Amino acid sequence: MPTLSSPPPTPTAARGAHDDRADTAFTRRALLRKAGLAGGTVLVLSAGGISYRAYDNGVLTAGDGGAYAAWEEWEAGSGPSALVSAAILAANPHDTQAWLFRITGSSIDLFADRARSLGSIDPFGRELVTGLGCALENLMQAAPANGYRATLRLTPTPSDPVHVARVSLAPGPRRRGALYRAIPDRHTARSAYAERPVAPAALAGMGALAAGLPGARVHWFDSQGDRARIGALMVAAARAVVADAQQSRDGFVWFRSSADEIQKRKDGLTLDAQGLSALTTAVAKLLPASSRSAGDRFWVDQTRKTQTRTAAAYGIVTVPDARDDAARLTGGRLLERIHLWTAANGLALQHMNQMTECADRELELGRPPRFGDALRTLIPEGGGEPLVAFRIGHAAGGEGRRRSPRRPAREVIA
Amino acid sequence: MSSRDGGRFGAARIDAVTAPLALVGSALGVAAGLLELTIGPSIRDWVGDKRDTTSLGLATTLLAAVALLATFELRRPRPRGEGHRVAVAIGLLVPALVCFTTVGRLWDVPGALLTAAGALVLSTTGREEYRRAFDEPHWRSGLLVLCGSFYIVLGATAAGVGGALGVIGGVLIWAVARKAPAGPGRRNALLLLGVLPFTLLTWWSVATPLLAIVTLLVGQGVIRDARTGTADSRWDRSSQAA
């Protein structure tokens, strides 16, 4: 009887179909396995690339190595060179370290290294010389700590703006003051500050640091209205600086974007010192170095969203004549004393000089004095001329104050 | 004499030239590492201006020691097994190339010698040996060894406890790649022990969490390979017994 069912497949046909399916399955499985292996290889190589980038750009070793050794070894020396080791840890514009020292038997001479100028950012050397004043203050603080009685003579003249000071040394009683002890803890804090006012007594205490510094004063702006007004000026000035292509370029050349560059040059602005969180700093180091325009945008954003928004108070150091180098040196000494005082008393400070940078640039190019006038209106009649500005407050996180690179004393002693 | 025998004879002759090259290169490499460790800060121009010449010296010495080990393996009369020559070539080339990227001028001579030696070994390795060396389980183990090496390099550059955990973690990952501990449970535990402490301590670095994910993925593959291999060999034994 015939059946409707198909005849049973021959063993050969059955084996053939099975083999085809098996072959297809094998091929597909093999292909998937190969693809998985290739994908794994790509992943491992990518992880290797990221690991290498992390190693090469010092993600895990921020603030270490020869470029930062000066912060560790500052008290290791003896004699006059120990004073220079303290001086080089001073605040200075863009970490340009525009200083040179000469040590003779009983004196230390300080010279301006004008080749390290900020160019169009600081066309008249205001910040450069103020930074030298900061170094002088550290040196003067270090003198009694090392058993010297120091006598300072400011020597800049229009005919010789390079030799700016001579410190004569004589044996004296050994005394380590609070400001001296704060030297290795003084760092610029660019991060957000806590919403906490700075006590009026603290402001008064810092104002009193001007004692013995003829003509130098600090003016405080801690009311909400003043902070808003100065904050808006700071943001406008930051925008003006980045809009000026020359100023933007002159600032960018001092940005050190790789760990090797930091170790080689031992100066300049670094990602580590930008006050970013550890995570953000790591991401920024892993990514390719940012362009000038990206760096400019970042600075303006930080100024607007973080720095001016969280400033507890602004301070402006004034001197009788902000164009006079001797007055700038004296104003720089006051600025450094204030910064050391904040370090010794748990406060944070950030130098913010975009307003004076814009004012000087206006003067250089003969533009209407928009920022120059704004600065003058901030200071009461008879209060002197604005030299430099800064914000203070209580640092909100640990990432606020990070060390900046330094050329060791032996590299700056002529 | 067959062409294959002729190839082996040629390889032996070339090895007679390669081995001294590799020996001198790795010995100079070790010397470079020791120089970095001892007088590194005084010769920063020669060591790529590295911030931490101690870490660099340790890493250079370690990598040069790997190259030295590969040199001794090259001189071994009987190969250890499949992929022996490929492993030797990798042992010469990886230290040479890694140090080229970071050590500076001090590595120019040892790096050139090791690269030449590694290239000579590769050029005299047979196709069949390449095929065996790069089969799937070997490949996965090799990837895991690489991951362990990345841990060691990152650990060597990180300071303090974190750095030590990175180096130890890398060695533990190597042990998993070598299928040192018995049983998948122990291998998994060892893998986690190698990966997690350093990663947790440096989570913010981005690099170590990413590396941890990749290492765990590859590590699982290696552990599965080992388990399958064990199961297969058991099955083989039971089949033979039947």
Image: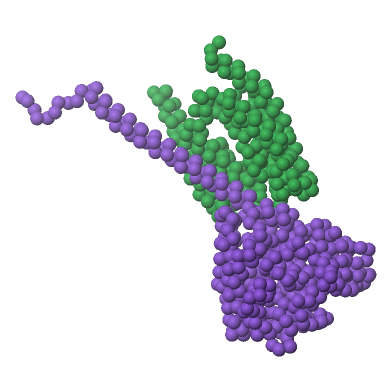
Horizontal and vertical percent for residue A19?
30, 28
Quarter of the image that includes the N terminus of chain A: top left
Note whether B63 is above or below A284 in the view shown: above
Q: Is residue B73 left or right of residue B230?
A: right
Picture coordinates of residue B130 (x, y %)?
52, 28
Position of the C terminus of chain A, as image quadrant, is: bottom right
Hey, which quadrant is residue A412 in on the image?
A: bottom right
Query: Nearest the camera: A312 or A319?
Result: A319
Q: Nearer the viewer, residue B138 or B106?
A: B106
At a point 55% along the width and 10% down the height, the residue shown is B1
The colour one sees for chain B in the rendered image is green
Is B21 drawn above or below residue A379 in the view shown? Answer: above
Task: Name the residue located 51 percent from the left edge and 47 percent from the top edge.
Answer: B214
Q: Is residue A193 above or below residue B217?
A: below
Residue beneath the point at 44% across and 26% down:
B237
Q: Residue B241, relative to residue A85: is it above or below? A: above
Tint applied to chain A in the drawing: purple
Residue A274 in view: no
Q: Which picture quadrant has residue A157?
A: bottom right
Residue found at the very far front of the displayed protein: A366
